[in-house]
Amino acid sequence: MKTYSAKTVQEAIELACLDLGVTPDELHYEVLLEKKGLFSKKAEIEVYTTQMMIEYIESYVRRILTNMEFEVEVVSYIQDDRIFCNINTDNNSILIGKGGIILRALNFIVRNAVSLNFKKRIELSLDINGYRENRHKKVAGLAKRLGKSVQKNKIEIRLDPMPSDERKVMHQVIAEMDHLRTESKGEGKDRYLTIYYDENK
């Protein structure tokens, strides 16, 4: 994040945009100081851009994994207001962990670090060599198969506990299917999802 000072907030915004080479709608800012005296005016803002956030994420990931003696490549992009960051290392399986548990922990650490640094809660999805994307495709396929079964038999299905990101995929897929609804219950790692038949939906 960077700070800029000028006589007014608007002038500080214009200065930041000029320095960073962005338009005002690409700039995120917080007013730190605004004085409107009779003989003097001063404003100070703290700013960042989405690109600055992405660069921070990639640098943070590289630093963590390099310190763990991994060689890494990082590629990021934005889709639907979520930042996707795909990592490729010389040993992907270790960083993914059993059932993706290490990957989820890494996602949690990086997301919290970014949110703390930029003072904003962000939507972040870390992936390692496409593991998460492929896993979500499989979960989506499973959701469709189970959903069709509930539609046909009108009998609810309770699934085994699964991570929050996979439950979210399940919820989204089932929400698009007729006469079905989902509900999550339980706490922490024991939280599970149930698919119900709902003739009113």
Image (cartoon, helix red, strand yellow):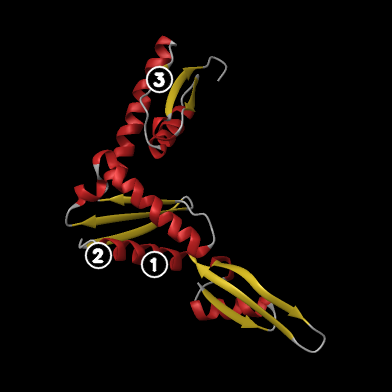
- Tag 3: amino acid: Arg
Cα separation between marks 2 and 1: 16 Å
* Observer able to see residue 148: yes
Instruction: Tell me residue 53's x, y (percent).
Output: 45, 64
Q: Which residue is mark 2?
A: 66
Residue 86 placement: quadrant: bottom left
Instruction: Tell me residue 107's x, y (percent).
Output: 37, 51
The correct choice, above or below, for 26 with respect to 107 in the image is below
Question: Could you tell me which residue is drawn at 20 percent across and 47 percent down?
Answer: 93
Q: Nearer the viewer, mark 2 or mark 1?
A: 2
* Observer able to see residue 125: no
Instruction: Determine the secondary structure under disc 2.
Output: helix
Q: Neighbour class for label 2 at 10 Å: few (<14), some, many (≥20)?
A: few
- Tag 2: amino acid: Thr
Badge 2 or badge 3: first in the primary sequence? 2
Question: Could you tell me which residue is drawn at 43 percent across and 59 percent down?
Answer: 113
**The C terminus - image quarter:** top right
Q: Nearer the viewer, mark 2 or mark 3?
A: 2
In the visual, does 136 lie left or right of 151? left
Q: Nearer the viewer, mark 1 or mark 3?
A: 3
Q: Neighbour class for label 1 at 10 Å: few (<14), some, many (≥20)?
A: few
Image mark for residue 158: 3
Image mark for residue 24: none
